[in-house]
Image (cartoon, coloured by chain):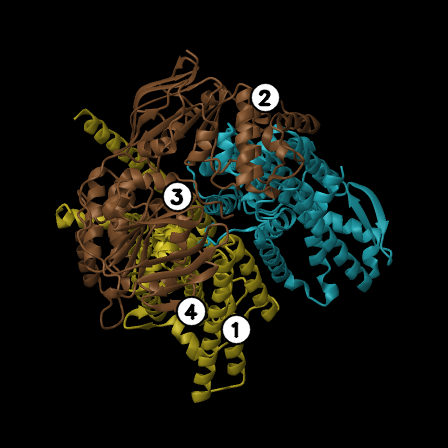
Amino acid sequence: MQQESTMRVFYRRNTDTIRLLFITIVIFITMSSLSSRFLRPNNFLSMGFQIPELGLYSIAMMLVMITGGRDLSIVGIGNLSCIVAALIMRDGYAAGLAGGAMIMNILLGVMAALLVGVVCGLFNGIIVAFTGLPSMLVTMATSYIFTGIGVVLTNGEAISKVYPEYVYFGNNSALGLPIPLWFLIAALLITWLLLNKTRYGFEIKMVGSNPLASRFSGINIHSVLIKTYLISGIFCAVCGLEILARTDSAKANYALTYTFQAILCAVLGATDPNGGYGKVSTLVLSLISMQLLSSGFNMLRLGTYFKEFAWGVLLLVVLSANFLNNEISRRRYVAKMNKRAAQEDGS
Amino acid sequence: MDNIVTIKNMYKSFFGVIAMDGMDFDVRKGEIHCLVGENGCGKSTMIKVISGFYTYDRGDLFINGKKYRKITSAESMREGIQVIYQDFSLFPNMTIAENIMMYDTTSSGRVMVNHQKQVDSAQQVLNRINFDINPNLYVYQLNIAEMQMVAICRAIAQEARLIIMDEPTSALTSSEVNKLLQVVKDLKNQGVAVLFVSHKLDEILEISDRITVMRNGKSVFVSKDGEALPSKEELIFHMTGKSFSDKRNAWNINTNQTPLLETRGLGLQGAFEDINLKLYPSEILGITGLLGCGRQELAEALFGVIQAQSGSLLIYGKEMNPFSSVQEAVAQNIAYVPEDRLTKGLHMNQSVADNAIARIVDQFRNRLGLISGKKTEEGKHKALHTVHIRGMRPYNPVKSLSGGNQQKVGLIKWLASKPRILILNCPTVGVDVGAKEDIHNIVRELAKEGMGVIVISDDIPEVLNLCSRVLVMKNGRIAHEVFTDDMDIESLEAMLADDDLKEVV
Amino acid sequence: MSVKLKSFVKTSQFALLVLFAGTWIVFGLINPSIFSVASFFSLTRACIVPALFSLALMLIMVLGSFDFSFTMVGAFASYCSIFIITELGLPQTPLIVLLLISIAIAVLLEIVNWFLIDKFKLQPFITTLGTHSMLKGMILAFVSTSFIYTLPDSLRKLSTNYLTTAKFADGTEAVLHIGILAVAIMYALVHVLLQHTSFGRKVYAIGANEEAARRVGINVSKVRFFTFCLAGVIVGIGGIIHDSLARCTVPLPPDLIGQELTFVAAVILGCGANLQARGSVVGTFIAVFFLRFVSTNLIMLGIPSYWQRMVTGCILLVSLLAQVRGKRAPQAGKE
């Protein structure tokens, strides 16, 4: 192997992260200079409360994208888990449960929500793994099914009024950071461990980049796919629990735009839409960037409509930039190879 | 000049891999010309240059007497050259008539499609080769042989003057093959030239007017006009070449031990039958035969990619059913390096290092059960040093390496898991001479250390170099078993050519 | 001729027709008013807009591509067209002008989609998800957020323009809206285009095997371009008709935006998703009617209307699973 300076190696292995860090810093500087209120601690605090929802959904989406698929049902799973937990806790609260009984009830709600995540995730995973149908179509259908179940359970209304003790977790800080943010950090750490420190994490990248070669390597593709959708489902359920804690309400159609935002966040975060590559560090930076932009837009009073427009444009810009970047390096590579071949011919 | 295609001294390389190395070739009007050569000799590249899919680096290309520095697919088709690819390029969701007349539809400039006229024209073409089938059937309803006929009809409908068929008989039964050969003869009678690329020497000898043998990007033999065609033995001799080193295996195999792998009566309908073989520790066993003899399927069955239907396996003396999945084979410490590293062997977009440790990731766990980054790095370093790969950057994607180096990475991946049985399928296809030697040396070292190796290859000198024992397969059965000590190339080639056994299917 | 009939019988369109007929009979037995002409008319009116949008999506899917933004394109084009005319204070504008403006905008937007998918080779689903979001934001942020209840005269006339009427058992009337003619004409045109012109053959070819289509000399980019344009024309018209029937125009009509799955389900149900799919116009038509019939009459089975979403999702899932037979070895869930 050729010896390269450690600096160069570091740069080449982490170009994505460095590039994204640069972008994040630029966004931060731009936003701060455009609005004086941006740098206030209140702003950062509120960002800290908002970011975990997008964060958890983005992690779920990123995992599925690494396998080369798309999961359009993440918000459906999230809302359904939220609803299930809310129903249990609302009835408990209305019955006046307190003390130990209240804790049992809350735990029951949490378990139920997680179970919903598991079941929905398995449902998606088994269908995608065993039928070979495009995940986009399958999860499009299941998103309607899960959301539909949510609508049925709630009669189309919002469920609210659960224990203040539970809601506490969604609206207060601990050790200086919002509690939901701690959950996000934990989720990111777990994902990082999964992707970098387990055999599963290794296999998921292989399956995403070449399923056939993975099969020939002895990787059980079905198992990898099912695990992925299962884990994704669990993250969505956690997100649902967080939504309940923060907003004290559960709706079947809450924040449907998160699906798109999660895809954007993953793609901006250097996840390859074709599968085989995804990194937690870049996802974090992408998350921060999107949150900074979102808050910045709010400060500049640009409205939700403008935000939606901006997200759409941003996605197209990122995808196009990726394409152009690949094209340029491909052409450079071909030219280099041809030059080398010509030299060898001449010698 | 009466040639449709003339190629003089043509060179073409891809990213440093030489595909055509001074190739000369020509096809005359109305002749049946067969192109023979083993995997990786450059046949497909030359065809793609003729059909306009690739450009060539240096040399001369004349089509119908016109010189072309660059030719596009459209120009090639206009000159009357039609290629029938191995996947036929048909549209399953349209009828036979629509497929046959597709070119007419797309290029005539007419807006409306007259269905009846389409069917009539298609019927005319079908009649030209006596293919009796309802032109209103959809292509997805057809079997492979019928699809091939439709593909040929489409070429004829485009008034082809030269039809290039790339391995047309690989998926056909013998009666379908006969029909195809008859069609090829009919075509010749109608003045259409056919370039027939194939491995099947019987068929080639039956219908050729002239034969060109290609090897390592060059033409090594062209049969002369008017002279009798060469014999099969001669052909094989030209195909596989004479170069080989004198190294042979210098150690003895103790056949009194339990074999690492034994098969009893292994069979798979349509592929192979009654396979009984034994592989001993430290043995390098060769399996060879012409394309279609069943060696490919046998290799995959031994690794669990496909499941044999009858017979049993004995791994180190323990009897078991044929593997139903790759995981089962891997659990028995069997490793398989496939012939197609591009799609089956490696993850082209992942780094060299990641591909190298793909199978042994589990070994780098620390006490917590998680994978230790430090151990992984050490493991990558160690794995990549087992085999010398010049100029390799471990974190670059594997697709940036040359063919030979890619093959080495594929080997590294499987060797890292320390298998007891290693199956190599065409290990040095598309690999340059230097890397070939390296790979052979690695295999010998492994065998010396006790590994059992099965080498499946149609490269006769390679088989003789590496293996102490060779099984020759023909038509799905083991036809001969020879020891390489007292064997030379000519005799082995003669065995590949001999005709004794009848067909299995 | 009998070969054609026999092959039709084997198709999924025939199965769908049988399914529809069966469901119709079952529902009719529960509630005989379903068998009435009035009921049929009112179903037809509800199907006009979905039929048009599904047709546009079908074209794109037959080509082997996908467009998530088609509903937004239609809504955007139509809203802008009416908004411009209203702002200019020209309520007398003839229908044809409104249509042309809407079509022009829709076609332009689809060309943007085409460019990204064809020239930049971006994945169709994610890309059109991006244009969808972009348009949603654009219309509210840069055009207007107002609901326009006073439509130009020509559109108001159009909304009450009907061919004939029929009465329900209880005396209420149902009309057969003229919009059904538009549907019939567009479907007929697309049918002829796909089945009887060389352009249509090329579209099928690209959808079946893009590489093979290239090899046969088809200019894939050009065919794609015109297909996307045609889809733009159809949704441009569909948007105007939608607004006319709704008697108002809003930036984000809820029966279009967010209902994309229903149209996808119609196309897949009607055409199939595997190799044998020929993208039949007839199939799409039947599927649109069937889906709408089921969802409007769900209540008859004792299923409240807010179950609609779930039922549609189930139908799509079931029809996907039913077509798995034709598939080969599973891939890693790629798009």
Determine the chain carrying the residue at label 4: A
Is C143 placed left or right of A179 in the picture?
A: right
Is C158 placed left or right of B11 in the picture?
A: right
Q: Does mark 1 fall on the same chain as mark 2?
A: no
Q: Are marks 2 and 1 in contact (CB under 8 Å)?
A: no
Which residue position holds label 1?
A: A84
Which residue position holds label 4?
A: A238
Per the model, the C-alpha gap separating discs 2 and 1 is 63 Å
Per the model, the C-alpha gap separating discs 1 and 3 is 37 Å
Give amino acid for label 3.
Leu
Q: Nearer the viewer, residue B93 or B232?
A: B232
Q: Colour of chain B?
A: brown
Q: Does mark 3 fall on the same chain as mark 1?
A: yes
Counting from the top left corner in percent of width and height, residue A185 is at 32, 66
Which residue position holds label 3?
A: A319
Per the model, the C-alpha gap separating discs 4 and 3 is 29 Å
Q: Colour of chain C?
A: cyan
Q: Is residue C206 visible?
A: no
Please name the residue shown 51% across and 51% down the image: C328
Determine the chain carrying the residue at label 3: A
Disc number for residue B108:
2
Asked which secondary structure carries label 2, the reply is: loop
Q: Does mark 4 fall on the same chain as mark 1?
A: yes
